[in-house]
Image: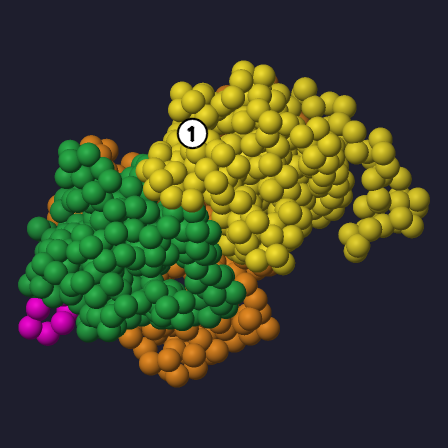
Chain colours: A yellow, B green, C orange
Amino acid sequence: MISGVKSMRRTTQGVPGVRRPSLADLVPRMMPRLVDYWVTVYRRTWRGSVTTFLMPFLYLTAMGVGLGSFVDDNAGPRALDGLTYLAFIAPGLLATTAMQTAIGESTYPVMGAFKWHRVYFSMAATPLRVADIVGAQLAFVAFRILLTCTVFLGVLAAYGAVGSVGGGIAALLVVVLLGVAHAAPMIAITARMKSEAGFALVFRLGLIPMFLFSGAFFPITQLPDVIAWLARLTPIWHGVELSRMFTVGSVDGWAALGHLTYLVVVLVAGWYFAVTGFTRRLAQ
Amino acid sequence: MTRPVTSTGHDPDPVPGGARTLGLRVFPLFAAGHWRVVERNFLLYRRAWKVFLTGMLEPVLYLLSIGVGVGGLVGDFTLADGGAVSYVEFVAPAMLAASAMNGALFDATYGIFFRMKYEKLYDAMLATPLRPRDIARGEITWALLRGACYSAAFIVVMVAMGLVRSWWMVLALPATMLIGFAFAGAGMALTTWMRSWQDFEFVSLAIMPMFLFSATFYPISTYPDPVEAVVRWTPLYQGVVLCREMSLGALGWDALVAVVYLAVMGSVGMYVASRRIGRLLLK
Amino acid sequence: MMISARGLRKSYGGIEAVKGIDVEVSAGEAFGFLGPNGAGKSSTMRMIAAVSPVDAGSLEILGMDPATHGSEIRARLGVCPQEDSLDNELSVMENLVVYGRYFGLSRAEASSRAKEQLAFVQLTERAKSRVEDLSGGMKRRLSVARSLINQPDVLLLDEPTTGLDPQARHQLWDRLFRLKQQGVTLVLTTHYMDEAEQLCDRLVIMDNGVIVAAGSPLELIAAHSTREVTELRFGVGDNESMAEKVADLADRVEVLPDRLLLYTDDGEQASQAVHDRELHPVSSLVRRATLEDVFLRLTGRTLVD
């Protein structure tokens, strides 16, 4: 597959024979061949997603409705651009759910496919290329997010927290993009991790702070300036903002374009590093 | 069918005098065998200190986000006695109780399942003079010690943020250990019935609602009466009451009820867990 | 007597794995359980290791009853299980020390013994490695080292060399042989006949939960086989018809799909006789009878599992 002499000259970081991917290497071509595998995986594991459906609903009820009654009686609508706390928090939870699903699917399952059941290695032993494997993995994550978030959006609509059907669909597409923009860099990191012990750090120093300080629960303007700017650098904040614009129905075109561009850039970069990471790991 | 371990006289107590009373079975803190299990876990954690330290961070982040961040939107709560309490003061002790619950449960469910089914660690241990009971006690002791470190750190943060009103807070550390004991015991007992990772879904299904609805984020009086009656008897609610009364310095009979409730829950869990581990592994 | 079992039985969920066996192992002996998969060897070993309650019959280990003195018995046993149950999260050295602590050894004692054992199984250089990074043979040796940490009177080894390459097997045999010389009682299960011949003073062949033969390797060969075996290959399809033509040349002739086995006390003579009759096998080979012949004769050639 890789021609010896030429590739030896173009090695990246230590693993001999692994060259930098060309544009063609980055584009998946045979992804449909992996559909059967992922359908089987889904059939085996869909039961495990009950909590992912339920969790945002519980958060919404406890925080949006329960705590929301206190917020609305107090500072509420004044601090939240006229929104009730429920309407404020709902799109935030939609976005953080997408992020959590994405990161969850991109950590232990991906590590397992390298390390325990080694299915990526058996895929790589066929005509499939790395971009196909990466692409199919991300497509599966996207499918998972789509499913979870559709159900959640239904709950939001029942609570009256979705402005319009079009807005809801737009929000759904946005959070799927947001999710994949998290999954791509995450699988790139997982591919480079030797042991699953590091996931604890990923969750505690990455996922949880992003979940708690991304503007989902309270406006980041309440944060100290430095931390607020840090929050603006995270993709999740852009996702929360977009999701809120669409569910509430007040879209600021230029801001939306900016947020979308940011997410696409993160996705493309993540894709690149995922392909290089997988290539290197699979060459070992 | 496997036979019950104890009825065949298997798994004897080699301690001279055979102290096989229920009391010693459950509160074994000074029997020797289980400290070996604790030691093994300690050795492991010495290397994973980064993971250990970041574990302390998690509840603090929740406190800052929900307590301070969302708290800014909520304003003060009025207590039953008419006094006012800031939202972060109200939430902090609940976070303390909830993190004690989470830590203990994580160790006692995922941790134990992994060691039992995947690592076969207990098979190796049972090939030595250690008995199932030593393993159950050892794992729970470890969970409690680890939990105590986390709780102590959180209490220090609470004090530093000025969220503690009373010296009763000194008792919050043992209180969190009691919460840990209750959940670790129950969690470990349940784990012995788990068949695959999928079954842990049930643990999450019990924990998530408890975390969100046990008067953690707003007073129990917010609920309609029937809901309130149910919430009142969840174990986390008991833990939250205990911690909150200590930090606000309003200790009452409720705290005593909570202590008894949690102690019984943990003891029953421990007892069941030691018997079940023997039954599962010694067959 | 180190181990003494009478009418030992064990079932799992209605399936009887061990159907009443009698076994005696005396001090310093190397004793083997041979048998195909599912013969009941591992179940028997678990009962002897005092981790599996006996269903019926009597069992005494080191003069004690495992039902009442499990912990005391285990204190004097070394167990090397079929699948390595090493502590993957700990280093090689830590595995030994921590395990020693389970036996109540002081930390100093445990680490000095651990060093000794590592030297004994030639893993000293890997003391700091993670268990995950060891090869199969190294893990096996580490398992043996671990089972010796309490200086056991009896060492139980469940298929000690399954899955090892020839070098690793011979290395392990060498270590086990030394232990035997030091007076440690060895009890092992195996389905490798060469292993049983190498290591065991005495063995039993188990099949289907019962003992079908017992004795020293030589006694078993004498009782259930001839001294030598001549193997003839005539090509697929011809073996059957040729069998009739050579039937009178041996005590017993066995027809396999790919060859004929002539059981005889003088293989060369049989081979010569075949040639004299102008039967021309593609190949012929004379060899000494082994335990494998005994084993296959007693337990059959069909796959179990």
Q: Nearer the viewer, residue B98 or A49?
A: B98
Q: Nearer the viewer, residue B160 or A108?
A: B160
Dot 1: chain letter:
A
User: In the picture, residue C178 is in which quadrant?
Assistant: bottom left
Q: Nearer the viewer, residue A259 or C163?
A: A259
Q: Residues within 10 Å of mark 1 (few under 14, many from 20)?
A: some
Number of numbered labels in the structure image: 1
Per the picture, the main secondary structure of the magenta-coloured stretch is loop
Q: Quadrant of the C terminus of chain C?
A: top left
User: In the picture, residue A47 is in which quadrant?
Assistant: top left
For disc 1, the marked residue is A53
Q: Is residue C20 visible?
A: no
Q: Position of residue C251 (x, y in %)?
A: 43, 35
Residue occupying image coordinates x 88% and y 45%: A7
Q: Position of residue A39 (x, y in %)?
A: 55, 21
Kindly state the secondary structure of the residue where label 1 is placed: helix
What segment carries the magenta color? B12-19
Q: Is residue A195 above or below residue C102?
A: above
In magenta stretch: residue B16: yes
Q: Amino acid at mark 1?
A: Phe
Residue occupying image coordinates x 19% and y 34%: B224
In magenta stretch: residue A237: no
Q: Position of residue A144 (x, y in %)?
A: 53, 28
Q: Position of residue A145 (x, y in %)?
A: 54, 29
User: In the picture, residue C231 is in which quadrant?
Assistant: top right
Question: Which residue, as the protein is rendered here, is positioned at the far top?
Answer: A165
Question: Which residue, as the protein is rendered here, is positioned at the far front?
Answer: A78
Q: Quadrant of the N terminus of chain C?
A: bottom left
Q: Horizontally, is B281 left or right of C296 in the view?
A: left
Residue occupying image coordinates x 22% and y 44%: B220
Residue occupying image coordinates x 81% and y 46%: A18
